[in-house]
Image (cartoon, coloured by chain):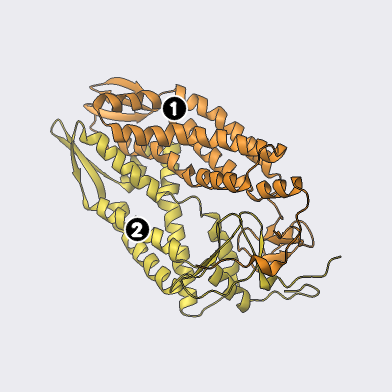
Chain colours: A yellow, B orange
Amino acid sequence: MKNKINTALFVACQQCDALFDKPHLKQGQLAKCNRCGSTLIERKVDSIERSFNWSLAGLILMLPAILLPIMGVTLAGQFHQASLFDCILVLIDRGFYMIACLVFLFAIAIPIVRLSGALYLSYCFKFNKLKPSLLNFFRAYHHLDHWAMLNVFMLGIVVSMYKLLDDTELSVNLGLLAFIFWLISSTMSAAALDQDYIWDKLERAFPRSCDNEYC
Amino acid sequence: MNTAKDASLALCPKCHKLNNLTTEPQQCSRCRGMFYQRKKNSLQYTLAWNIAALLAFIPANLYPIMIVYQLGIGDEATILSGIGEFIDHGLYPIAVIIFTASIIVPLLKIIGLFVLVYKVHTGIRLKPDKHSKFYHALEFLGPWSMLDVFVVALMVTVVELGFVTSVAAGPAINYFTITVIFTMFAANSFDPRLLWDKKTADQTQLPTDKLSKNVSDTL
C-alpha cells in the first residue's frame, strides 16, 4: 500500500489528469494546465456578490420573459402573437408533446432551476448560513451544466424572425427584450459562480470525519 | 509529466477534489459523491449512444420536419429541402446557420466521436493535444444543433392563423431531437483523459520529472 498523499497540496487537470502543485491565486487569476491548456483552477472576482445579484435579476426578469409576447405576425389582416408560455400551450394543444417537453425543459425549467440554485447558494454564502445539505445541493447543480439552452433558443428566435420577415409583417414585442436580458443575466450568474471557492469553503465548513484517511 | 493516476489519486468529476483512491467506486471526501477514476466503460457507452444517434439521424433526414398549410393545402419540407428553400429565397446567412446547426454539427459529432473512440481503442496516430481540443469543440457545439427544433417550435406557435396559414411539425422533429440528445450523451460519456492515458502507456516510460517542476504558469 502506498503511503497517502496530502491531496490538499495538489490539483489535477480535469481534462488530461496531469498533477500539479496547487497554486496560490489571487482574485481574478487563473491557472492553466501546461499539457493540454485547459483551465485548472480559477479565482473569480467578487464571485458571491456578483452571482447573487445576477441571479436575482434573472429571476425577476424570468416572469416578463416567459409571459410577455415575444413576437407577432400579421398575415392577411389577421394578427397573432405568442409568448414563450403560449408556445408550450400551443404545442401541447396541437399534440406535439415531445417538442413541448423539450422547449419547456431546455428553455424554461432548467434555466429557472439553475438561476434559483445559484441564488440560493450565493444567498447562503452571503449571509453565512452554510448547511451540510449544500454539499448535495451543489453537486446536483452541476448535473444541469450542459442542459440550459437559452442561448440556442435565442438564436432560434432570430432565425425564425428572419424566416417570417420574408413573407409576413413581423412585430417585435417587449417579451423579446425581457428574454434577451434574462439570457444575459442567467449566463452571467452561471459564469460568476466560483466553483473552486465554494467547494473549498464548504469543505472547510464540513470536514468529513475520517479515521485513517489523510484529508 | 506526472498524472493523478500514477500517484493513485482520483479527481472527483463533480467538485474537482483530489482523492486518494482506495476503493472503486470511490466516495469523494468533499462532496460525498461516488465516482470512478475514469468514467466507467466510457468507450462502450460513447459508442452505443453514438450508434443510436446515427440510426435516429436517418429518419430525421428522410421524414418532413415542417409542414406549412396554406388554405388547407399542406407543403412538406425535410431539413435539406428547407435549406434549399432558404437559398431560393436568397436568405443565405440563415441557410448557412441552419445547415451548420442541423447537418454539419450532428454529423461531425457522430463521425468525430467514432474516430476518437477508435483512436483511443487502438492508439493509432493519437495526438492527445489536438484530439482533446477537437473533443472540446464537439462538446461545445452539441447543444447548438437544437436550433432547428426551437425554430420549428416557434414557427408552429407564431404562425397560427387558422385556415389561412398554419405550420405543423413533422415526424422528423422527434428523431432529430433524439439524435441531438443522444450525441450529447455520447459526448458526455467520453472521457478525454483516456486520450492521454493511451499515449503515455504506448510511449516508453518517460522519466518522471519532479512534481514541483510542473508548476503551472499563472496569468
Q: Residue at x 70, y 46 (%)?
A: B199
Mark 2 — residue? A184
Q: Residue at x 32, y 47 (%)?
A: A84
- Furthest toward the bottom, the residue is A128
The front one of A61 and A101 is A61
* Residue A15 in which image quadrant: bottom right
Q: Is disc 2 placed on a helix, strand or loop?
A: helix
- Furthest toward the left, the residue is A77
Q: Residue at x 49, y 50 (%)?
A: A147
| Residue at mark 1: chain | B
Q: In this image, A20 relative to B91: left or right?
A: right
Q: Dot 2, crowdedness within 10 Å: few (<14), some or many (≥20)?
A: some
For the residue marked with disc 1, what is the amino acid?
Pro
In the rendered structure, find residue B171 and report the number of the disc placed on it: 1
Residue B206, position as x, y percentages in the image? 75, 54
For the residue marked with disc 2, what is the amino acid?
Ile
